[in-house]
C-alpha cells in the first residue's frame, strides 16, 4: 500500500538536526543522546547502503572514546535509536533501521525529504540557462533559505562530518554569489544586501560575499555603512584569522572613500568616543596585531625609564603530530583558548591573534619566570575546558627588553 504524503519524513540537517512526520517531531538538543543522533545521521547520510558493524564502530568511536565492548555498545545504541524514532510512528509500527547479515541500514521504503538533497537539487536546476531569469532567481533564493547553518551542528568532530560541512557551505556560498550576480544583472542592488548580510552570519570569513555586499552598499548610496562594515571586517579578519584583506577588496575600500566627504571637527566628540566603556574593563585588553605591535613599541620606550620588564608569550595550538589542526576544528578550539586567556590575565595585559592557531600575549611582569607561571596557569584552565587529548598547547617566552 502506497504511503500518504503526510507520512513522509521531513529531515533537517543544516543548522539543526530534526525529523518531522505528520504532527510528530524529534529534535537533537544539547549533548543528550549525542551518539544516538550521530548513528541516525550516519545512516541517513548513507541511505541505500548497509554498513557493517565494524564500519559503524569505526565511525562512532574513532576519536578514541572509551568503549570496552564496541559490538555490544553498538547493539545498545541501535536499540536506543529505534526507541527514539518510535516517537514518530503515531499508530503505526515502522521499522526505520533495518538489520541484515551483520549490517545496518536506513529503511529506504520510507519516503524522506532532506533539506540537503533539496538544496543540491535546487542549485543544479538554477544553473539551467534555458530557464527564465525569474525562475532561476526564485530557485536560488529557495536554495539559500534551506541553509540555516552548518551540517549536523555540534554533533561530532569527525572527518566525514567536516567534509560534508565544507561541501554544503561551499554550495551555499556559490548559490549566494550566483543569486547576487543575477540581482546585479537586473540592477536590484537593494535585494543583494539582505542576502549577503544573512550569508555573513553563516560564513563570516568569505571575502567574496563581503565584497559583493560592500559594492551593493555603494550602489545604493550607503557609503558610510560600507565604511563601517569594511573597518569591522578588517578588524575581524586580523583578530580571528591573523590575516589581512586582499587587494581586490581594498580597491572597493578606495571606492568607498571617494564617496565620503564628511570630516569630524568636534574634539569633544572624539574625546567621548575615546572614553566609551569597552564592556570588558576587568579583563586583559584584546586587540588586532597591528595595535598590539604599537602598544609593545610604546611599552619598550617606557621600560627605558621605569625598568619594568615586558614579556611576550606565544601560545600555539597543535595536534598530536605537532602540526596545525584543520581550520574547522580550530574555530572552536581558539574560541575556548581565547576565553581561557582573558579569564586568566590581568586587565593591564594585552592579547592579540597572531595567526589562525596562535595568540600572542604581552605581560607586564618582573621576570620571565613569572610569565612562565602565568602560561602554565592558562594551560591548566584550557585543559580543564577542552578535554580532547589530540589538541594541546605549546609556548615560547621572550623578554622585550633590549640586551
Image: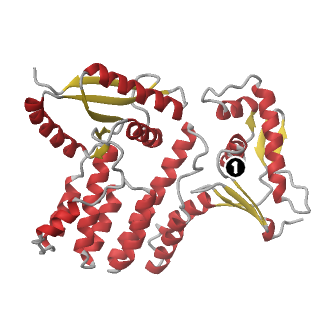
Q: As drawn, is 309 to the left or to the right of 185? A: left
Q: Position of residue 43 (x, y in %)?
A: 71, 45
Callout count: 1
Q: Position of residue 380 (x, y in %)?
A: 47, 27
Residue at (71, 25) in percent of width and height: 67
Residue at (68, 52) in percent of width and height: 28
Q: Position of residue 118 (x, y in %)?
A: 60, 63
Quadrant into which the N terminus falls? bottom right
Q: Is residue 301 above or below residue 197?
A: above
Which quadrant of the view contains residue 371? top left
Q: As drawn, is 398 to the left or to the right of 157? A: left
Q: As drawn, is 300 to the left or to the right of 184? A: left
Residue at (38, 64) in percent of width and height: 177
Which quadrant of the view contains residue 71? top right
Q: As drawn, is 158 to the left or to the right of 191? A: right
Q: Position of residue 176 (x, y in %)?
A: 42, 65
Residue pointed to by mark 1:
44
Quadrant into which the C terminus falls? top left
Amino acid at each position: 500500500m502506497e504511503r500518504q504524503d503526510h507520512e513522509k519524513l521531513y529531515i533537517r540537517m543544516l543548522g539543526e538536526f530534526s525529523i518531522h512526520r505528520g504532527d510528530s517531531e524529534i529534535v537533537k538538543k544539547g549533548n543528550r543522546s549525542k551518539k544516538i543522533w550521530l548513528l541516525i545521521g550516519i545512516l541517513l547520510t548513507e541511505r541505500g547502503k548497509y554498513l557493517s558493524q565494524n564500519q559503524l564502530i569505526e565511525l562512532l568511536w574513532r576519536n578514541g572514546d572509551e568503549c570496552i565492548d564496541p559490538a555490544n555498545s553498538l547493539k545498545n545504541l541501535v536499540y536506543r535509536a529505534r526507541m527514539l524514532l518510535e516517537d514518530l510512528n503515531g499508530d503505526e509500527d515502522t521499522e526505520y533501521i533495518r538489520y541484515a547479515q551483520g549490517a545496518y541500514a536506513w529503511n529506504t521504503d520510507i519516503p524522506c525529504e532532506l533539506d540537503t538533497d533539496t538544496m543540491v537539487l535546487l542549485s543544479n536546476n538554477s544553473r539551467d540557462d534555458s530557464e527564465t531569469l525569474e525562475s532561476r532567481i526564485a530557485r536560488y533564493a529557495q536554495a539559500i533559505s534551506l541553509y540555516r547553518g552548518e551540517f549536523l551542528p555540534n554533533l561530532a568532530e569527525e572527518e566525514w562530518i567536516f567534509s560534508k560541512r565544507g561541501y554544503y557551505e561551499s554550495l551555499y556560498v556559490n548559490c549566494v554569489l550566483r543569486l547576487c550576480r543575477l540581482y546585479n544583472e537586473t540592477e536590484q542592488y537593494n535585494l543583494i544586501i539582505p542576502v549577503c548580510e544573512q550569508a555573513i552570519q553563516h560564513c563570516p570569513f568569505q571575502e567574496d560575499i563581503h565584497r559583493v555586499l560592500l559594492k551593493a552598499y555603494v550602489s545604493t548610496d550607503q557609503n558610510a555603512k560600507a565604511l563601517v562594515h569594511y573597518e569591522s571586517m578588517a578588524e575581524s579578519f586580523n583578530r580571528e584569522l591573523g590575516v589581512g584583506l586582499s587587494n581586490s577588496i581594498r580597491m572597493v575600500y578606495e571606492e568607498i572613500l571617494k564617496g565620503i566627504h564628511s570630516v569630524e571637527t568636534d574634539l569633544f566628540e572624539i574625546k567621548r568616543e575615546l572614553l566609551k566603556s569597552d564592556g570588558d574593563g576587568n579583563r586583559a585588553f584584546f586587540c588586532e596585531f597591528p595595535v598590539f605591535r604599537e602598544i609593545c613599541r610604546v611599552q619598550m620606550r617606557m621600560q627605558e625609564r621605569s625598568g619594568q620588564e615586558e614579556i611576550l608569550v606565544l601560545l600555539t595550538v597543535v595536534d598530536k603530530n605537532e602540526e596545525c589542526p584543520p581550520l574547522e576544528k580550530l574555530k572552536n578550539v581558539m574560541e575556548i583558548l581565547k576565553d581561557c586567556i582573558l579569564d586568566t590575565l590581568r586587565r593591564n595585559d594585552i592579547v592579540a591573534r597572531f595567526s589562525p592557531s596562535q595568540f600572542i600575549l604581552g605581560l607586564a611582569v618582573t621576570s620571565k619566570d613569572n610569565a612562565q607561571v602565568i602560561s602554565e596557569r592558562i594551560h591548566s584552565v584550557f585543559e580543564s575546558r577542552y578535554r580532547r587529548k589530540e589538541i594541546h598547547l605549546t609556548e615560547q617566552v621572550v623578554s622585550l627588553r633590549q640586551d
